[in-house]
Image (cartoon, rainbow, N blue to C red):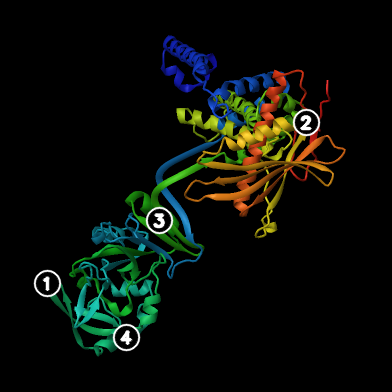
C-alpha cells in the first residue's frame, strides 16, 4: 500500500487517511471472500467424477506448495516477468485518437502533378437500396461554391478547376427506381459534367479526345460535347441542336464537338478515380416474398454515350448537379504534400497530392499510435526463458506422477496444477511489475530522460499489465505442456487413427496404452462391464453389451467384451460394433489390451476416445483401491505413452 501511494500518481489526489482506510477495507474484503469461498465450492460426485469446482482449491494449494519448495526457480521466473511488465508499463505507449492522417495510397502519380480536393465524407460504393429498407449508396457530398473562390485567393495556387457533376441516378428498375437524369429523344442520359474548359484542358487531356469539331470554350453558351457512339445513335453532327428533356423543363444545346468513347471512359482524375460521373446499378437481388425483394445496389461509371460534357454555367442550371471535386495546380516549387496536410487540417477536407514519388492522401481520421515497440524483442526473450523454465520444471515432475495418480488425480488435473503455478507467477509478477513501472517514471524524470510515452495510470492499463504477464507465463506453460508427454500421461491425448487403413467390412485394430496384471484382471473386466452397461440409457454416449468371452487361443489367454457404441445424438449419430480384447501370452504375467472396431473412421476415432477415457477412470479407481486394501497389491501402477515412445511401468510384487 505504501509503494502504491508513493508511486501511483492518482494516489495524491486522495487524503492519506481515506486512502489507507479504503485500501485496508478492500484488502480485508478480498481476503474474507477467499477464506469463505472454498466452503461453497463443494459438490457431490456425478458418475464417479469430481465436479470442477471441488478441484479449484486443492489445485491452487498444491501449486502454491510446489512454488514454495522450488523457491529459487520461482524467484528467478518472477523477476523475469516483473521486468517484462515494468518495461511494458514504462517504455511503451498505445494511443487512439482523431486527427490528421497522411499516407501514400499509390506509388504511381496522377495524370497531372498537383492536388485534388473532396469533402471529408467517403463514398459508399455498395449498399442495400432504399426501396428495400437500406440507406443506399453515396458518391460525393457537394463542395460549397465559396471553396472555389477561397482556393483562387491562395498565393500558392496557380490553377483552380472545379468539376460540376450530377449525382448518381438509378439504372435498374425496382418499384419505380429507374430514374435517368433526362432523355434525348428516347435515349437516356445518366450523367452531366460541367467544367471550366480552358483550365480543365491544362490539367486533363480532354482536348486531345476530340474526334470531330472542337473543344469547349469558356465563353460558349448552350454548347455541349457528346460521344461518338451517341452521335451515331442519334444521327447528329457537329453544329446540330439537341433537346435534353429534364424533369419539368427542356434544355436546348448545340453540339460543338465529339469525344472518343474509349479514351473518355478510360480517363482517370488526379486521385485515380473515374472521370465520368457515376450511376447506380443493381448488384444482386434476393426475393423475400412475392413482389418484395432485397436489392443490393452499387456505383459504376456512366458510359460515354450516357454522359454530356458542357460548361459549368450550363451544368449549374441542371437540378442535382454540384461540385464533386476541385483540382489544384500549385506554383512552381511548392510542395503538394505539405499543402495537402494543411488543407485537410484547416478546412476538414480530403486532399490528394500527386507527386513524382506517388499519390498521397491527407484527411482527418481515427488513428492508432504505438511507441516503444522495439521492447518487443526483449519480451520475446523473456517468454522463451519462461518456456524453457516451465519445460524443465515439468520434466522434473516425472517422479511426482505416481504420487498424483495414487491419490486419484487425473492427467488433466495434473496439467491444471502446472498451469496454476504459471498463473500465480503471472498475477504476482503483473502486479509487482505494474508498480515498478511507475517507479521508472520517477527515475527517468530525475535523470532527465526524454521517453515519449504516456503514463498508464488508468484501471484499464492495470488489467493490461496483468494480461501481459499472464500471457507470458501461460504461453510458456502451455507450450511446455503441449511438448511434454512425460508429465501428462493422458490416455486420450495425441492419438489418431490412420484413415488410410480403412477397408469396408474390416474392423480397425487399435492398440490401447494399458497393461493389466494377472491378479487384477477379474476386477478390471467387472469394471469394464459395469462402465459399459452404465451408459445403456445415456443419450450422448449409448452402449449396448452383447456379451463377454473367455478362451485359450494359440497358447494365449484371451478375455473379451463385445458391445455396440453410439454417439452424436439423433442429429448426426455414429455407430460402431466393437470387441474389447485382453490377451496374455504364454509365460507372461500381464494382459495387453486392444480394441477391434467396425465403422467409419470418425466413428472409430470417437469409440477409441471413449474406451481410453474408461481406462483412465479405471486407473484412478485403482489408486483408491490400493489405499483401501493394503493386503491386496495391484501391479502395474503405470504411466503409459503413445505409439512411438517407450512404455513405462512399475510392477509391484506380491507382499
The x, y position of residue 439, in whole percent, is 56, 23
Q: CA distance from mark 2 to mark 4?
A: 94 Å
Q: Secondary structure at mark 2?
A: loop
Q: Which numbered disc, 4 or 3, marks the residue closer to the eye?
A: 4
Check if mark 2's residue and mark 4's residue have beta carbons within 8 Å.
Answer: no
Q: Which numbered disc, 2 or 4, marks the residue closer to the eye?
A: 2
Residue matched to label 2: 636
Q: Give the left or right position of residue 281, taking residue 497 as reference.
A: left
Picture quadrant of residue 315: bottom left
The answer to whether any part of residue 331 appears in the image is no
Residue matched to label 3: 340
Q: Check disc 2: other Cα within 10 Å, few if <14, some if 14-19, many if 20+.
A: many
Q: Earlier in the sequence, mark 2 or mark 4?
A: 4
Q: Secondary structure at mark 3?
A: helix
Q: Secondary structure at mark 1?
A: loop
Q: Earlier in the sequence, mark 3 or mark 1?
A: 1
Please state which of residues 49 and 310 is positioned toward the viewer in this rendering. Answer: 49
The x, y position of residue 398, in whole percent, is 76, 29
Residue matched to label 1: 248
Residue appearing at x 23%, y 65% in the figure:
291
Q: Give the left or right position of residue 446, taking residue 293 as reference.
A: right
Residue matched to label 4: 228
Q: Check disc 1: other Cα within 10 Å, few if <14, some if 14-19, many if 20+.
A: few
Q: CA distance from mark 3 to mark 1?
A: 41 Å
Q: CA distance from mark 4 to mark 1?
A: 28 Å
Q: Check disc 3: other Cα within 10 Å, few if <14, some if 14-19, many if 20+.
A: many
Check if mark 2's residue and mark 1's residue have beta carbons within 8 Å.
Answer: no
Q: Which numbered disc, 3 or 2, marks the residue closer to the eye?
A: 2
Image quarter of the C terminus: top right
Amino acid at each position: 500500500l505504501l509503494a502504491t501511494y508513493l508511486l501511483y500518481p492518482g494516489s495524491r489526489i486522495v487524503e492519506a487517511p481515506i486512502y489507507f482506510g479504503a485500501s485496508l477495507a478492500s484488502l480485508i474484503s478480498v481476503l474474507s471472500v477467499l477464506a469463505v469461498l472454498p466452503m461453497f465450492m463443494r459438490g457431490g460426485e456425478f458418475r464417479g467424477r469430481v465436479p470442477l469446482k471441488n478441484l479449484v482449491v486443492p489445485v491452487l494449494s498444491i501449486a502454491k506448495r510446489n512454488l514454495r519448495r522450488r523457491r529459487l526457480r520461482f524467484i528467478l521466473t518472477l523477476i523475469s516477468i516483473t521486468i517484462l511488465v515494468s518495461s511494458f508499463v514504462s517504455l511503451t505507449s498505445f494511443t487512439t485518437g482523431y486527427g490528421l492522417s497522411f499516407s501514400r495510397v499509390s506509388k504511381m502519380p496522377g495524370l497531372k502533378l498537383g492536388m485534388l480536393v473532396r469533402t471529408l465524407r467517403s463514398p459508399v460504393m455498395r449498399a442495400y437500396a432504399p426501396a428495400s429498407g437500406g440507406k443506399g449508396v453515396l458518391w460525393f457530398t457537394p463542395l460549397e461554391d465559396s471553396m472555389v473562390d477561397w482556393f483562387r485567393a491562395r498565393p500558392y495556387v496557380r490553377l483552380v478547376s472545379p468539376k460540376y457533376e450530377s449525382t448518381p441516378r438509378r439504372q435498374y428498375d425496382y418499384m419505380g427506381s429507374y430514374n435517368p437524369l433526362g432523355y434525348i429523344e428516347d435515349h437516356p442520359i445518366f450523367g452531366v459534367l460541367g467544367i471550366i474548359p480552358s483550365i480543365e484542358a491544362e490539367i486533363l487531356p480532354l482536348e486531345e479526345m476530340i474526334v470531330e469539331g472542337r473543344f469547349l470554350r469558356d465563353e460558349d453558351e448552350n454548347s455541349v460535347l457528346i460521344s461518338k457512339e451517341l452521335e451515331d445513335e442519334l444521327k447528329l453532327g457537329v453544329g446540330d441542336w439537341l433537346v435534353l428533356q429534364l424533369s419539368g423543363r427542356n434544355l436546348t444545346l448545340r453540339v460543338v464537338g465529339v469525344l472518343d468513347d474509349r479514351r473518355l471512359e478510360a480517363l482517370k482524375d488526379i486521385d485515380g478515380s473515374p472521370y465520368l460521373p457515376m450511376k447506380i446499378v443493381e448488384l444482386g437481388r434476393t426475393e423475400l416474398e412475392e413482389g418484395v425483394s432485397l436489392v443490393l445496389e452499387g456505383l459504376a461509371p456512366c458510359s460515354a454515350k450516357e454522359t454530356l460534357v458542357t460548361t459549368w454555367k450550363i451544368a449549374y442550371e441542371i437540378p442535382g448537379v454540384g461540385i464533386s471535386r476541385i483540382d489544384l495546380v500549385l506554383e512552381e516549387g511548392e510542395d503538394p504534400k505539405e499543402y495537402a496536410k494543411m488543407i485537410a487540417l484547416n478546412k476538414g477536407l480530403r486532399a490528394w497530392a500527386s507527386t513524382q514519388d506517388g499519390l498521397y492522401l491527407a484527411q482527418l481520421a481515427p488513428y492508432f499510435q504505438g511507441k516503444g515497440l522495439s521492447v518487443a524483442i526483449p519480451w520475446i526473450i523473456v517468454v522463451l526463458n519462461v518456456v524453457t523454465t516451465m519445460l524443465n520444471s515439468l520434466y522434473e515432475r516425472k517422479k511426482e506422477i505416481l504420487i498424483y495418480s495414487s491419490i486419484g488425480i487425473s492427467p488433466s488435473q495434473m496439467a491444471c496444477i502446472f498451469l496454476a503455478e504459471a498463473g500465480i507467477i503471472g498475477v504476482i509478477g503483473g502486479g509487482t511489475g505494474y508498480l515498478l513501472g511507475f517507479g521508472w517514471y520517477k527515475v527517468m524524470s530525475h535523470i532527465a530522460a526524454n521517453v515519449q510515452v504516456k503514463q498508464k495510470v488508468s484501471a484499464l492499463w492495470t488489467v493490461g499489465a496483468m494480461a501481459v504477464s499472464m500471457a507470458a507465463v501461460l504461453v510458456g506453460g502451455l507450450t511446455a505442456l503441449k511438448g511434454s508427454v512425460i508429465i501428462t500421461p493422458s490416455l486420450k491425448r495425441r492419438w489418431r487413427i490412420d484413415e488410410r487403413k480403412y477397408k469396408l467390412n474390416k474392423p480397425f485394430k487399435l492398440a490401447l496404452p494399458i497393461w493389466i496384471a494377472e491378479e487384477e484382471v477379474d476386477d478390471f473386466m467387472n469394471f469394464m462391464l459395469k462402465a459399459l452397461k452404465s451408459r445403456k440409457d445415456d443419450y450422448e454416449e449409448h452402449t449396448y453389451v452383447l456379451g463377454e468371452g473367455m478362451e485359450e487361443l494359440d497358447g494365449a489367454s484371451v478375455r473379451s467384451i463385445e458391445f455396440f457404441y453410439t454417439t452424436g445424438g439423433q442429429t448426426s449419430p455414429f455407430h460402431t460394433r466393437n470387441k474389447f480384447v485382453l490377451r496374455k501370452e504364454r509365460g507372461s504375467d500381464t494382459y495387453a489390451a486392444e480394441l477391434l472396431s467396425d465403422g467409419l473412421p470418425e466413428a472409430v476415432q470417437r469409440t477409441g476416445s471413449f474406451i481410453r477415457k474408461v481406462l483412465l477412470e479405471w486407473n484412478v479407481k485403482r489408486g483408491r483401491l490400493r489405499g483401501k486394501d493394503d493386503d491386496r497389491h495391484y501391479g502395474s501402477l503405470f504411466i503409459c505413452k503413445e505409439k512411438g515412445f517407450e512404455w513405462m511401468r512399475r510392477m509391484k510384487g506380491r507382499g
